[in-house]
Image: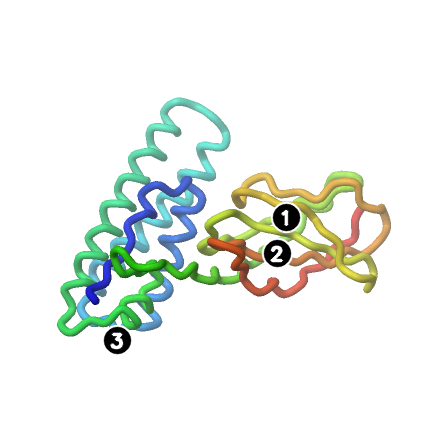
């Protein structure tokens, strides 16, 4: 049966769209041999994704002009991703398995969509500047539902660090001062799917 590439990314929240675009750039670049002729579009998407990422960060400071800029950059990313979808589907003899190597979600119309297991996120840093709290810098991937954290204290069994719908403002509160905490994160996909836990990153809580 004929398959399609989902354009549901157009409905993603800004942070998830940013993560999805980054994932697609990484995957299409890594699988360029199987997905030929996409270099120019992928390069353009990479630039647009970085611009969106920076605009999202800047808009956190507030201001109407920054919000307008973020919306404009979001439109550009979605437009280029749609172009990339069209280009992938135009590759001669493309199969669903090969198209899926792009990082986009694929499906057969009218058929059952099997939830894809998301990729594991990456913890890029822990902020222990606030007493009894660790801020978590997270580089997202392609979740459908958000991110789950867990942490262990000085080698003890891991406990839940909470659920977060995006990568913004993630923090684990009510931690013991003067103790080393190892934090991990995973992305939650459709259905009951979840990525592997990220490698632990440790910091002393103040």
Q: What residue did someone put label 2 on?
A: 185
Compared with 48, 153 (above or below) is: below
CB atoms of marks 1 and 2 within 8 Å: yes
Query: Badge 1 local density, few (<14 within 10 Å), some, or many (20+)?
Result: many
User: Of 29 and 84, which appears nearest the observer?
Assistant: 84
Specify the quadrant that holds the C terminus.
Answer: top right
Label 3 to label 2, Cα distance in Å? 31 Å
Q: Which mark is residue 136?
A: 1
Question: Residue 61 appears at what percent x and percent y?
Answer: 50, 29
Which type of secondary structure does the marked residue at label 3 adopt? loop
Please give the name of the residue rendered at 86% of the width and 50% of the height, measured from the top-left corner.
178
- Discs 1/2, front: 2
Residue bearing the label numbered 3: 34
Query: Is residue 194 or residue 169 the one in the foreground?
Result: 194
In the image, residue 100 lies at what x, y percent?
32, 66
* Neighbour tally class for label 2: few under 14, some 14-19, many 20 plus, Cα within 10 Å: many
Q: Outermost residue toward the top?
A: 64
């Amino acid at each position: 049966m004929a398959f399609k590439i989902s354009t549901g990314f157009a409905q993603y929240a800004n942070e998830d769209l940013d993560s999805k675009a980054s994932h697609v750039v990484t995957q299409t670049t890594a699988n360029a041999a199987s997905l030929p002729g996409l270099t120019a579009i992928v390069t353009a998407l990479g630039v647009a994704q970085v611009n969106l990422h920076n605009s999202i960060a800047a808009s956190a400071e507030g201001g109407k002009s920054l919000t307008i800029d973020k919306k404009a950059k979001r439109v550009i990313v979605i437009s280029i991703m749609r172009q990339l979808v069209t280009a992938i589907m135009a590759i001669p003899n493309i199969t669903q398995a090969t198209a899926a190597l792009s990082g986009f979600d694929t499906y057969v119309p009218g058929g059952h969509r099997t939830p894809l297991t998301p990729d594991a996120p990456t913890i890029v840093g822990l902020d222990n500047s606030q007493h009894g709290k660790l801020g978590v810098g997270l580089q997202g991937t392609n979740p459908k539902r958000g991110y789950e954290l867990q942490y262990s204290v000085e080698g003890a069994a891991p406990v839940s660090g909470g659920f977060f719908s995006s990568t913004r403002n993630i923090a684990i509160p009510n931690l013991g001062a003067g103790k080393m905490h190892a934090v991990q994160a995973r992305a939650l996909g459709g259905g009951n799917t979840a990525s592997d836990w990220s490698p632990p990153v440790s910091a002393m809580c103040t």
